[in-house]
Amino acid sequence: MADKQTPQKRGLRWWHVVAGLLVLLALAAAYVPLPNWFIEMPGTAEPLAQFVKVDGKRDTAKGSFNLTTVGIQSATALTLVTSHFKPYEEIISRNDLMGTEDNSTYQKVQNYYMTSAINNALTVSFKAAKKPYHTDYLGIYVLDVEKKSPFYGKLQVGDTITKIDGHHFDASTGYINYLRNHKVGDTVTITYANDQTTKTASGKLYQLAQTKKPGIGITLTDRTKTTTGIPVTANAGDIGGPSAGLMFSLQIYDQLTGNQLRKGRKIAGTGEIAADGTVGQIGGPEKKVYIAAKSGATIFFAPHMKITKAIKKAAPGLEDNYAVAKRAAKASHLKITVVPVEKFSDAVKYLETH
């Protein structure tokens, strides 16, 4: 005959069950990702010499130019709590990060931004170094297609529109003006490149919600390709986005002109680069200056934009990247000089004179 369990044994077994559940909850809190939440944090400072070859050669001079990144990781219940106690970690939603894009589409757009940044860096650096180059306009790169668009399901993110009704233009403004000379309801035929294949699609123009003008309902940017007289290979691996453009420009320019800018210094920075050399605002400057200083950089280039009353009215929460980075460096007692740049030549001049 089996022994009856004493109250003490029953209590002990119950405690084992509770303890096991607590362990499972702790593991879930630490390791199970929350699909709609992410933690944005300081990423890395990456020496650009590893990504760039000019005339088949790597840069082996002392010092380095470094792009800076913002890290993104899926949040867990635990990291949602601990992020409040770590410098420059921020909780962001999937919608804030990706909008309506899925993971694959988001990554495709980020890769395009990096490709475009490197292409503009070639244009800027070769023009500044007075070396031969040529830029071809390929067409309109499709960043998004509205669900109301008659081309939704036909055009995809990553397609390049090369003609409308057989007409090719040298800038996106040409395509936009062509469509505005039509009426809502007119049928147009688009020629576009998709995975190296040329296709066509037709649809009727409809009234765009923001401009009230006839259009096809896509978010777009110009797609160009710069060919250089001196061969350059540049690839940032799995790093995406447009913000490394300024630093790629400095790396390529310095190699083209004989490595005169760094003088052995570790230099970091951020900023989108336009083909005319203008340096544009980016996200996370406080996180980037933090990781730059922690990696040993002594100079950090930050995009600078004058925030006018009109800009404040249109975007009340917008802050100048330089001001944000400068404030972060001071608050965290970082030993780094934050330098404002509005155009590529500002960075070159600073390095030549300091």
Image (spheres, helix red, strand yellow):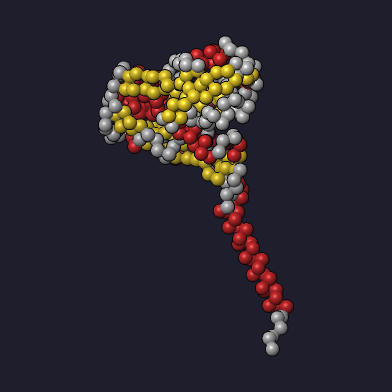
Residue for point 42% across, 21% down: 138
Q: In which quarter of the image is the N terminus?
A: bottom right
Count of numbered tags:
0
Q: Position of residue 162 (x, y in %)?
A: 46, 21
Locate residue 186: give its quadrant: top right
Q: Which of 215 and 108 is in front in this view?
A: 215
Residue displayed at 52% across by 31% down: 156
Query: In the image, is 212 to the left or to the right of 296?
Result: right
Looking at the picture, how far across and down is residue 51, in whole percent? 35, 35
93 and 291: which is toward the camera: 93
Name above or below for residue 82 compared with residue 259. Answer: below
- Farthest residue to the top: give it: 181
Q: In which quarter of the image is residue 152?
A: top right
Q: Position of residue 196 (x, y in %)?
A: 41, 30
Residue nearer the viewer, 277 or 168:
168
Closer-to-camera residue (9/161): 161
- Res 324 seen here: no
- 279 sits to left or right of 214: left
Residue found farthest to the bottom: 1
Look at 59% across and 55% down and name the residue there. 28
Q: Quadrant of the C terminus?
A: top left
Q: Say left or right for 232 vs 82.
A: left
The spot of residue 29 in percent (x, y) is 60, 54
The residue shown at (67%, 74%) is: 12
Q: Is residue 99 visible?
A: yes
